[in-house]
Each structure stands twice: as C-alpha cells, then as structure tokens.
Image: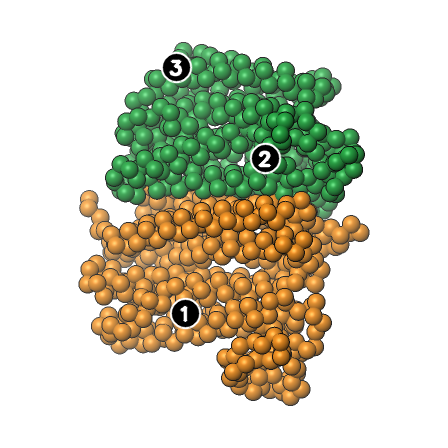
Chain colours: A green, B orange
Amino acid sequence: MELFWYLAIAIVLTMFFILDGYDFGTGIIHLFFAKEEKDKEVITKSAGLFWDSNEVWLVAAGGMLFMAFPTFYASVFSGFYLPLILVLWLIIFRAIGLELRGQFKFQMWKDIWDASFGVSSLLLALFFGIALGNIVRGVNLGGVEKGESVYEGHYFFLPLWDSSFSPLSKTPGVIDWFTIVIGIISVVTLAIHGANWIILKTNSSINKKLKGVILKLNIVLATLTIFSLIVWKIINPNSFDNFIDKPYLLVFPIIYLTGLIGLFFVKKLKKDIYSFALSCLLIIGGITSSLASLFPILLPSVNTVNEPLTIYNTAAPEYGLSVAINWGIIGFILLFVYMIIQKRLMGGKIDTMDYGH
Amino acid sequence: MEDMLFYDRLQFAFTITFHYIFPQLTMGLSLLIVFFKGKYLRNNIEKYNDAAKFFMKIFAINFTMGVVTGIPMEFQFGTNWAKFSELTGSVIGQTLAMEGMFSFFLESSFLALFIFGEKLMGQKLHFLTGFLVFLGSWASGWFILATNAWMQHPVGYEILDNGKFVLENFSALFSNPWLIPAFLHNQLASVVTSSFVVASIGAFYVLRNKQTEYGKLFLKTGVIFGLVSSLLVAFPTGDWNAKNVAKYQPASFAAMEGIFETEVAGAEIVLIGQPNMVEKKLDNKIAVPNILSFLTYQEWDRQIPGMDHFKKEELPDNIPALYYSYHIMVGLGTIFIGVMFLSAFFLWRKKLYNIKPLLWTIMFLVPFPYIANLTGWYTAELGRQPYLVYGLLRTADGISPTVSSGNTLFTLLGFVALYMLLGLLFLVLVGKTINEGPKPQTH
C-alpha cells in the first residue's frame, strides 16, 4: 500500500517536472536568448497558456504526500522551511510575470514582467535541483549535536547554508557545493527542455539557434552528470547498492542516458517532438534514478543516531491508504482525460492558433 | 514557545485572509458566468455572451491571485504546522488530496479552454467548459469545508497511543453533520459577494452613463442573485450553522453571542455592546430578552449556558475578536438583505436605474460582503480555539517544533510585502478591466 502511493506520488512529481519544467525552461531561455518583442511574446505565451494547469501537479503531489506520508510531509516541509517559502514566493513572481506582461502595451511594463518570469524560473529550477541534492545527500535528522538529538528523531531544521559549504559536514545546510551542482544540472536540463518546448510550440525566429544551444548545454550536462555521480559516490559510498542488488532498476539510469545521448543528435532529428521527448526522458530518468537509488528511503540521515525516513516509517495507516486508492484511481483517470482534451484542443504551434479574440 | 505560536498563527491568519479575498469571488462568479453563458445559448442575444466573457476576465485575474496565494496555504500545513500535519495527515490529508485531484485539475484545465477556446470549440462546448470551471471551483469549496468541518467537529477517527489521529471511516468525513450547513452557508456567501460585485459594476456603468446597456443587465442580474443569496445565507443556512455551534461547541456559542452569565429563564440576543473582559460583562449593551433561546431552540425560556459555565481553558482565547467577528457578519448580512430587498422592489417597479442614491449605495457596498465573508470565517476559526481539532488537539501543540519564531517573522514580513504588491497590482488590473468594460464583438 505504501508502495502504491510512493509510486503514485513519484509519477505526479515527475509529471510536474516534465510539464511545469518546460515552463521554467522556457523562462530561462527567454531570459538569455529572446531579444525581439515578437519572439518574447510568443515564448511567454507558450508558457503562459499552460503554467497554471501544470502547477496543479505540484499541488496534487503536496496533497498526496500529506495524505499518504504525513510524517515525511511534516518533517520535510518544516525542516526545509526557508527554501520552501522562497520557492512559494518565486512561484508567485513567475505566475504574475506571465499573467501581467500582456496587460499593458508599453515596453517598460513588459520588461519588468519578463524579468520577473525569467529570473524566477531560473531560480526555481536551481532550487528544485538543490532540493533533490538535499534529498539524496540527507540531513541531520533529529538535529543531533554531540551525539544527542535536539528534536524528535524525525524532525530537523536546515539553515540555508553551513559555514563549510560542504556536503560532508555533520550539519549540512540547504546549499553546499554538491547541492549547487545538482541545482545547476537541473537548470541546464530544464533549459534544454524549455528550448525544445519553444521549438515545438512556436515559430519564433530563434528556433534554429536554439538547437545549437541545446547541443552546447547537453555537453555541459554530460560533464556535470559524471562529476555529480563521482561526488555522490564519495558522500555516500552505498548510493549505488540498490542498482547492484536489483539490476532491473538500471532501467531508470538507462532512460536518462538515452535522453542524454539522443540529444547530441538534436540537429538530425526529423521531428521536433522527438527532441522534446528526449528531454522528457532526461527528466524522467533523472528523478526516477535518484529515487530508485534511495528506495525505500525517502530522506537519509547524516548521523547514526536517528534512522532515515522511509516509506514505511512515515506512512499513514493501512485503512486510509487503501480507501484512498479507490478515489485515487478515479482521479488519475479523470486527470489524464483532461490532459488529453486540453492538449488536443490546444495542440500545434501557438502563433498559428486562433483564440477568438 | 509562546512567540512561535503567535507568529505561526499571525502568518496563517494573514495569508488565509488575503487568499480568501479571491476564491470567494471566483466561486460565486463562476455561477453567474454560467448563468450569462446559458442565457446566451438560449436567447442568442450577444450582450449576455459579452457579459459572460467580461466577467471571465475578472474571474481570470482573481483566479490567478487565488492560485498563487493558495499554494502557500497548502504548504503552510507542513512548514508551520508540522506537528498538526503529522498527527492528522492520515485524516484530513484525504480531503486535501482530493481537492487537488478532483477540483484543481478540473478548474485549471478547463479555465484555459474557456478563456481561449470559444472559436475553437463552438458555443455549446464553450458553455460546457464554463460549467466545468464552476464545478471545479465549488468542488474545491466542498473539500476545504470537509477538512474544516472535521477540525470543528471530528468524526470517523481513532486516536492511537502516540497521539496520531487515524482515519477509521472515510464516508463519515462527508456525512459530518457540520459539513452540509457550513458548505451551503459558505457557497451562498460567495454568491452574495459576486452578486454585489456584478451589481456594483452595473451601478457604476449606469451612474457613469457609459456602457449603460451592460450596466442595467449587471444590476438586474446582481440584484436578483443578491437578494436570493443574502436571504438564503441568513436563513436557513446561517441559522443552521448557529444551531450546530450551540450543539457541538457550546463554549464558543456563549462567547460569540456575548453571553457572560447564564440566564435561567432564557437567553437574550445581544445586538450591540463591547465585551469587557475585566468585569466579565458587556458595556453599553442593547439586547432583546429571550430571543436567542427562541432562535436556537424554538423555546422562549430555554436555558443557554453562558461563559461562566465553562472552564477558562475551554473558552476561546480571544473572546472580543470572536464576538465582534460574529456580530459584524450578522449585522452586515442584515444590511445586505435590506438593500437587496429595496433594490429588487424598485427593479420590479422599473425605477431602479433612476434612483441614484440607491445606485451609489450598491456601488459603495462592494467591500462589505468581503468583510462579511472574512468575519464569518474568523467566527468559525476563532470559535474553534484554543483547539485545532475541537476538544482534542490544542493549537499550541500543532506548530512545527523546529521552526523558530525568528524564521516565521521573517517569512511573515516577506508575505506582507509581497501581498501588498499583489493587492496593488490586482486593483490596477481589475480597475482597468472595469474601466474598459465589456466590448461588443466585432466580427
């Protein structure tokens, strides 16, 4: 039962990063590469039409986490207090950036909201990566000092950074050089994803250029991936044990690799959708590989006093989880139906769509 | 510890107050939009379609604000109320997760289609998407009220030795006797807000003598919806809720009605007066004897326990605030009925559009249904104190154990600054939209 909800939440979160991921990526690309007003307009529109139905996936993941793993939800949300609230604020700036830009016609107004959209998208991508970095690195559960827990063993509080900035510190902060690297990987991945989205959904004049950008970013991504894997192995020598014990889990890293390698051929692909699919694979593979390497742990502990949080010691009791499966399945079916309807009606290039106003 | 609790409560109160400015409009307005669009489908008169599309613009601005201020609400359960989430997540996590699954997806998927898809889909499908947006937003209200109803009157749970609440009966969450009255009361109150908004924009257009055709349509629709909803908010739904409070939270009932001493021969209803917490009485009181007993139990001399009947730790911790919230809500609700009744009368006599003082009144009344909605929620939430889960889990025991008051104050200040900016932008955009008015179609 725990496993069902673990998988369900993993799927919803992955969907969030695929869908809202292209919005963040669009923001990053927009910030650095869109120069002409015509391009800026269509690029913001390619995110603006979809951001709110994409963001709902995050809300859904939050709600499901609350229901299925309340102890994990309570621990992680209070432990990462500051970065989470910062993310909330950034989400607000991202949204109003997209919604407000078109409300007045003068350029200064548009520039302000373009910056709001672009910068907050960039920072959100960075923060989500840092969050993933924190999850795989682990935290000082129980706030252990001198061998004793300060809080209950499943609670913690992370400062934004620890003076050493090192992932090997006994009291690591949210930001250290390892989580920063993961943050940058996330920014690069989502930038590639966003570029693919722009190419897929618009006829902007920078589309051709963006393929070159994707290629360059992909080289950076490959380098950073190898680097982060080495560091990860140093931080946690057992981090790849799951893949050795259960070789079928290797399918997730293979998904990631397929995306990574495939994207080197971005200029040769026949259809834009293929390239977009490859960056989806990057995201799917990246998230699922990280989760699989930890499984069944949800949040490792960097001390030996307190147990890591797992799907078993943080889950809600059996009855609630099984009754929720009933409505959960109906919900999922509805959800995919809406998505198909929406994508069908709003498929194709944004600039050639007729909105009727 | 005291500080932590104070800032956590203040931050939640501030963010939820600001947030609830928006959903209370969107829930009610979606109903009116469906009405306009439905009318257009039947009579094919363009101005109804223009009205639907005009209010969709207002809706969209409010919706965006509602979404971006709503996500912090869900997250704050975890960030600031971690212990509460840990202990109750297996129960109220159900209703909150269902809200995401069954209402947000519905609302957000079809809103984009409603706004952009009229030409793409044709009129019937366009109406359908509007209806689905309405359904989504009301479903959201339903799940939130179900969550709140459980906190007000917990049902279908078991408490384990470690203090955790465990769900024992899923359907009890939705057959909770607190839920239906609270849901209907809340939804009708949101229809009151949106009716006033529609009527007030109408009054503005008529008074300004521009877009008067639309002005008259908005006034007429707003007044009719406003009269019906303000009557239903008071009776039966408001009455029903008050009876629930008297039954399930008698200490809160005494506090919100301002009854300091139990009267043996039936309780009076307080109209005006200021709670004096030192002398435990109401200053400058105006009250009508025995009415409260009659309204609550239909018996003139039925005894209702006053605050002297309860231990201090059972009583809400801010009695004056609770008392004022409740009385402001009831007082405003009464005024709404009066104004809407008068307006409806003159509408029927075909004089409404020429009675300027009444139009000015309607126009300037628009902030007050918002205040009535918010004070209604304050009544519910302050009345539940000092508990998070009534009678079972104290508010002080629900906060995050590791988040210091300094961190909460920091984020509270950030929210205040950010929401000021949002509020300002919101007013600019709504003002601009109203000023431009509904444009007749040009094709």
Q: Position of residue A237 (x, y in %)?
A: 71, 19
Q: Position of residue A110 (x, y in %)?
A: 31, 37
Q: Is B294 placed above or below B429 here? A: below
- Kindly report which numbered mark, 1 or 2, lies closer to the viewer in this rendering: 2
Q: Is residue B99 visible?
A: no
What residue sits 46% from the left and 74% below the top? B331
Reading the image, the residue beneath label 1 is: B228
Task: State whether discs 2 and 3 lie on one chain.
Answer: yes
The chain to which mark 1 is attached is B
In space, the residues marked 1 and 2 are separated at their CA atoms by 53 Å
Task: State whether discs 1 and 3 lie on one chain.
Answer: no
Amino acid found under the numbered disc labelled 1:
Val
What residue sits 36% from the left and 49% below the top? B425
The chain to which mark 3 is attached is A
Reading the image, the residue beneath label 2 is: A160
Amino acid found under the numbered disc labelled 2:
Leu
Reading the image, the residue beneath label 3 is: A212
What residue sits 39% from the left and 63% below the top? B367
